[in-house]
């Protein structure tokens, strides 16, 4: 399944026009808050790390593919969400809105 994860991240990166980003994939034993995946970005340098917990390897292909697209979609809105979190609205409200938008993008891309 690790090979599928890497392939789907690369495909999502290309489809979302993020080929100028350096995206690294890391598999870790577990993530905070029972997440199956998490992304960290440095938008100044177009670098991103996507972390997948070992738990993701136990999911079905469709769920894993959606998680890959979801995390890549986070890269698109990363800078905006960081700015907003530091300035305009409460972090919980912002994170909820970011997750909704990111999930929508991921669903659109997976349906293609």
Image (cartoon, grey):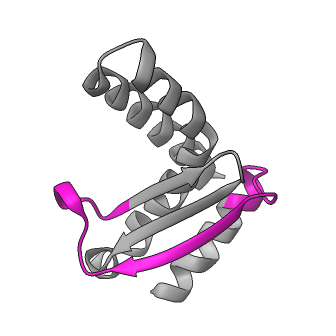
Does residue 43 sit above or below 100 in this rendering?
A: below
Magenta region includes residue 34: yes
Q: Which residue is at the front of the view, 48 or 61?
A: 48
Query: Considering the image in quadrants, where does the N terminus appear?
Result: bottom left
Does residue 110 sit above or below 81 in this rendering?
A: below
Question: Residue 47: x percent and y percent?
Answer: 65, 59
Residue drawn at (59%, 35%) of the image: 79
In the displayed structure, does residue 50 sit left or right of residue 12?
left
Which region of the structure is painted magenta?
A: 13-37
Residue drawn at (60%, 68%) of the image: 9
Q: How many numbered markers are drawn? A: 0
Question: Residue 104: x percent and y percent?
Answer: 50, 37
Q: Quadrant of residue 4?
A: bottom right
Residue drawn at (41%, 25%) of the image: 85
Q: Quadrant of residue 58?
A: bottom left
Magenta region includes residue 36: yes
In the displayed structure, does residue 43 sit left or right of residue 67?
right
């Amino acid at each position: 399944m690790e090979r599928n994860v890497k392939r789907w991240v690369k495909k999502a990166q290309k489809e979302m026009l993020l080929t100028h980003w350096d995206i690294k994939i890391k598999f870790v034993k577990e993530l905070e808050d029972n997440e199956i995946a998490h992304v960290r970005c440095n938008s100044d340098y177009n670098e991103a790390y996507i972390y997948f917990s070992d738990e993701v390897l136990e999911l079905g292909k469709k769920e894993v593919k959606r998680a890959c697209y979801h995390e890549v979609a986070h890269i698109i809105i990363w800078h905006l969400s960081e700015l907003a979190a530091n300035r305009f609205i409460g972090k919980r409200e912002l994170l909820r809105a970011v997750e909704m938008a990111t999930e929508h993008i991921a669903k659109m891309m997976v349906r293609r």
